[in-house]
Amino acid sequence: MSVNAGFAGALPDDGHAGGSSAEGSKVERRPIIRDGAGWDSAAARALERTWSDAPGLLGFLRTNDHKRIGRRFIVTALLFFVAAGVLAAVMRVQLAVPDNHVVGPDLYDQLFTMHGTTMMFVFAVPVMQGLSVYFVPLMVGTRNTAFPRMTQCAYWIYAVGALTFWVAFALNTGADAGWFAYVPLTGPQYGVGHRADLWNNLVNFTEAMGLMVAVDIATVILKMRAPGMSLRRMPLFVWASLVTSVMIIFAMPSVMLAANLVSFDRTFGTHFFNPAEGGDVLLWQHLFWFFGHPEVYFIFIPALGFVSTIIPVFARRPMFGHDAVVMSLIATGFLAFGLWVHHMFATNLPELGKSFFTAMSYMIAIPTAVQIFCWIATLWTGRLNLRVPLLFVLGFFFILVLGGLSGIMVGSVPLDLQVHDTYFVVAHLHYVLIGGAVFPLFGALHYWFPKVTGRMLDERLGRWQFWLFFVGFNVAFFPMHILGLQGMPRRMYTYGAETGWGPLNLVATIGAALIAVSVLLFLINVIRSRLHGARAGDDPWGASTLEWSTRSPPPQYNFVALPVVTSREPLWVPRPSGAPTHVSGLSAEDREGLVTTVLDALPDVRYSYPEPTIWPFVAAWAVWGWLFWSGLSSAGMFWGLIPPALAFIGWYWPSNKETTRQLLLDKRP
Amino acid sequence: MSVFTRWFGLLDSGRRETTPASVPPVRIGDALDVANLPSYGFGTRNLMWWGNAGMMTIEAVGFALMVGVYFYLRSLNAVWPNEGRPPDLLWGTLNVVLAIATGFPNAMVDRAANQQNVRKVRIWIVAFAVLTLALLPIRWLEFMALNVRGDASAYGSCVWVLLGLHTFNLVTDVMDTLVVCAVMFKKKIDGKRFVDVAENAGYWWFIIGSWIPIYAVIYLAPRM
């Protein structure tokens, strides 16, 4: 492609719009207002009109703005985090002293299953994806996600699915077979009632949501980056989101398939997991953990992205070893698929196979260590700004490394056999998941809150939250290592005084109380700061990525003009003289965006975002109806498909108004 | 070399990515003006291509895992099929032949869509839709000729679910074809709709392409 240096006069204002398509477009035209001017311009006002949602409930349900949807994901997921945390607190109260009877065994089974399932499926994955939905389009410099209606539908599928799961729990039909729902406990023979069905249903909802968002995010990242943001200039959180999305695409089908096979066993009498008819119970474990291990990394890799985002900003220097960190993220993504059998060391698999999975599990240490060294080097050579987000990252270091050390222990077959199904594993997984994901998540929430709301979170409350969480966490979970080594099994609702486990359990419960206070402080901080916090301004941290180049909170169209990127840290590195500063020429009267090429992000095609509509919301409920009905009867599996099909057609069907307008903008490739 | 690549020195390897853009962006003052760029593109230039690629990957992984389940359970059973007989070859094989035959009108639809020739698209997509509809009753007969009930044994469960998974995809894409076909008969058609038709054609290749290995597993594996 060759272009002269370009003169304003060389381009007609409106002449290139429309007229070239096959049919129609004999409409009288006035010049289209195009973007590219500053905040105080006719173009900005046109963008404001074009992108604003209708007010009221209808506007709320119809919106496909990635920021509103992303915020909903985050808020909903955090509410479920609190709810599942309350269940954990009840369990800790029950276990605080021996021979306790606050709850009985049946409710206790539901408590730990609801807690684990909610934390993994309803909190952790959605909150990470929600942050990607909110921040990836801003960080790559575009105006919405690639398939905004799909994101909208994904949110509602998630919301109604999770709500169903919890309403069932309130009606004493909470899942009760553990978060990995092993057969035969969930099969037709032992899983009587509808508790296991509800679990299968939830998996369908949350995985459908996860897959939809993953495809959407991967497409935004590959095809909608601001001109000049080649892959090598992509921010690390965006890399983490890309790796996570690709992993989700390859891993989530496994658990969906597994959940449906067990559903078929339950409703249609198939025999996938029935050894008497040629089925196999270990098949479930293979399918579940082929998803389940990567699942841990869907949570962990975005968190690595948060850490790599926060550290350079608070060390006030570019990331040390940027390329090495990218390679490590990708390597972690690949290795994650070779680890699933380390969850099955206590089964009768060939010992040689187990050694392979031990070796694979230890290999994860390599990319993780590379990243940790890069972070340390960045901090070491930077000028630290020790604010709350960085505190959480430092806490993450400490706890994740401890979790990694106990990981080395359970990665070894003979040791794992000793501590399998004991509190040692409970301690390990909480060190890895809370240390590896929740600490960075709180850091990220503190870091990005000003962008989302325009106000700062309170620093003092934040520090209190951090220290209570850090101390509370270690007080709650460290003793569990010892309890596990002493032989205390997980998932038992009480224990006798003669075991001697009482004192350490009491300590753990005190730690849990500290965590509860810490989370409460966070909620208070959020509500208070949302209302009265100090004004943040566009870029309160002096950060380097594009989301800080627009207003806080960002307008619905994100950028008044799409940015042009010339370096990895567009807000830090001065632009080469003469380089363009922004994109112009997109219609400000239509929801237009820009598609760029995969590697170098060269501008390629203009893109019309879909208008807001109610159909994705309707489709989500229709899918809910189908899944719910098919859980009750086999007829529902077939007839229940009709409403979703109609909803999807309504979603797609182009209106005459849309077509007429599009014809004005059309320009043949 | 364009202004764009000149300013940025984008890849260190020295190789430059090219865009097929008929009209490149232009410099206007400090801005990179994209008003002249096309408003839609075919193939990988189109976002829907990437969305579809993602969805096809998800489904392919699902199929592959189900095939894995089949062979995993087979490896645990001394006799396979552990109940029932292998399915009759007639309808399944006919569906393979027919599915391959749909490739021709599908390719023609794809070509006409890329040329944005409304008349040709209309003719070929109707022919294509009719042919795909013929696959459905034959698929029904396939289920009837599996010679085993889904609740009879692990083998029966495997073949029913495997065929069911592919049928779900088949029905979805036949429906999708009918919808884009209907849109093509509207009075006004904007350019993006041709892209949709081309994407639908692309998805159909996946339906055909996945059917052949699944056919082999369902019909040939139990005979070996």
Image: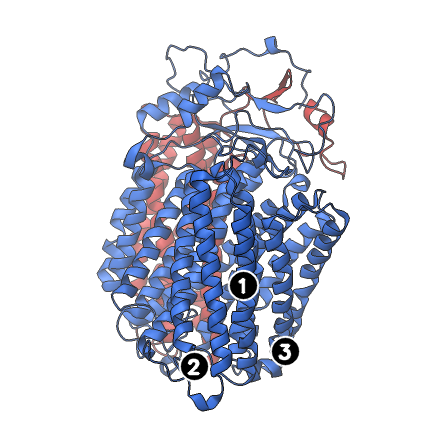
Chain colours: A blue, B red
Q: Is residue B160 above or below residue A622?
A: below
Amino acid of disc 3: Ser
- Write down the quadrant of residue A226 in the picture: top right
Q: Position of residue B190 (x, y in %)?
A: 40, 25
Residue A280 in view here? no
Q: Please determine if labels 2 and 3 lie on a single subunit.
A: no
Label 2 to label 1, Cα distance in Å? Answer: 44 Å
Front one among A8 and B189: A8
In the picture of the structure, the residue carrying the numbered disc 2 is: B79
Label 2 neighbour load within 10 Å: few <14, some 14-19, many 20+: few
- Report how far apart the C-alphas of labels 2 and 3 lie in the structure: 36 Å
Label located before the other in sequence (3 or 1): 3
- Secondary structure under tag 2 reads loop
Q: Chain of mark 3?
A: A
What is the x, y in percent for residue A538? 56, 32
Relative to A142, is A107 above or below?
below
Mark 2 or mark 3, whichever is nearer to me = 3
Where residue A9 appears, as percent x and y from the top left, is 60, 8
| A535 sits left or right of B12 in the view | left
The residue at which mark 3 appears reads as A412
Q: Where residue A367 sits in the image (x, y, percent)? A: 68, 59
